[in-house]
Amino acid sequence: MFIRMPWESGKPVSRKAEVLWPAPPRQLNAAIPEALRRENEEARKCFKAASFTATVVMVRRTLEGVCIEQGITKKPLFKALEEMRDKGLIEGRLFEWAESLRVLGNEGAHYTGNRVSREDASDALAFSEAILDYLYVFAAQFEDFKKRRQSALARGDGVSQKNEE
């Protein structure tokens, strides 16, 4: 493990040391509900322990939590994901990702005799985190961006929306 200790004027300071290697796990944005961050963290722990089947089951569980947090009440999960798509909460590509994660999670939850690969578990984590970021971080960030741009344009501070090139 390599760490960096903060120093000022030749003396250590009270800030925490920073781990440089191995890279610390990604921290999900605080805008993502805590319960979903906990589910994701458990999925990451399963992955780190090479429990790839458990990883994809936890990813599926996270998807169920996303649906509930978004106010979706339909069951089973397939119908809930369709409702999210129909309400415009997730679009085509994200729906496809979520549906693929649902299917993989089902394969993990029910005995098939097949193993879940490390690559599939890793992709499942990445795709589920992308869905969390999209729903809870980027959607809000983009709305803030649009409001800020609209305000700037209304004040005459912004560049015209028309691009003459």
Image (tube, rainbow, N blue to C red):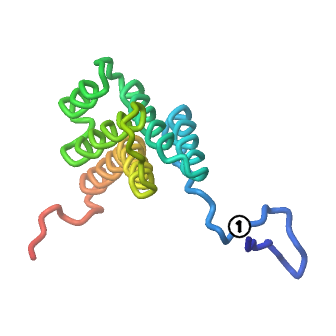
Task: Tell me: residue 163, above or below residue 150.
Answer: below
Element at badge 1?
A: strand
Identified by mark 1, the residue type is: Val
Taking the spot 45% from the left edge, 35% from the top edge, the residue there is: 62
* Residue 68 located left or right of residue 52: left
State the residue lying farthest toward the left: 164
Estimate the x, y position of residue 64 in percent, counting from the top left.
Answer: 39, 29
Circle 1 Cα neighbour tier, 10 Å, few/some/many (<14 / 14–19 / ≥20): few
Q: Nearer the viewer, residue 144 or 53?
A: 53
State the residue lying farthest toward the front: 113
Q: Quadrant of residue 65?
A: top left
State the residue lying farthest toward the bottom: 10
Task: Tell me: residue 26, above or below residue 9.
Answer: above
Q: Nearer the viewer, residue 76 or 27?
A: 76
* Residue 12 located left or right of residue 165: right
How many numbered badges does the structure rendering display? Answer: 1
* Residue 6 located left or right of residue 145: right
Q: Nearer the viewer, residue 26 or 99?
A: 99
Taking the spot 88% from the left edge, 72% from the top edge, the residue there is: 12
* Residue 98 located left or right of residue 50: left
The residue carrying mark 1 is 19
Taking the spot 53% from the left edge, 43% from the top edge, the residue there is: 43
Estimate the x, y position of residue 165 in percent, counting from the top left.
Answer: 9, 76
The quarter of the picture where the N terminus appears is bottom right
Estimate the x, y position of residue 22 in percent, counting from the top left.
Answer: 65, 68
Estimate the x, y position of residue 104 in percent, counting from the top left.
Answer: 34, 41
Q: Quadrant of residue 89?
A: top left
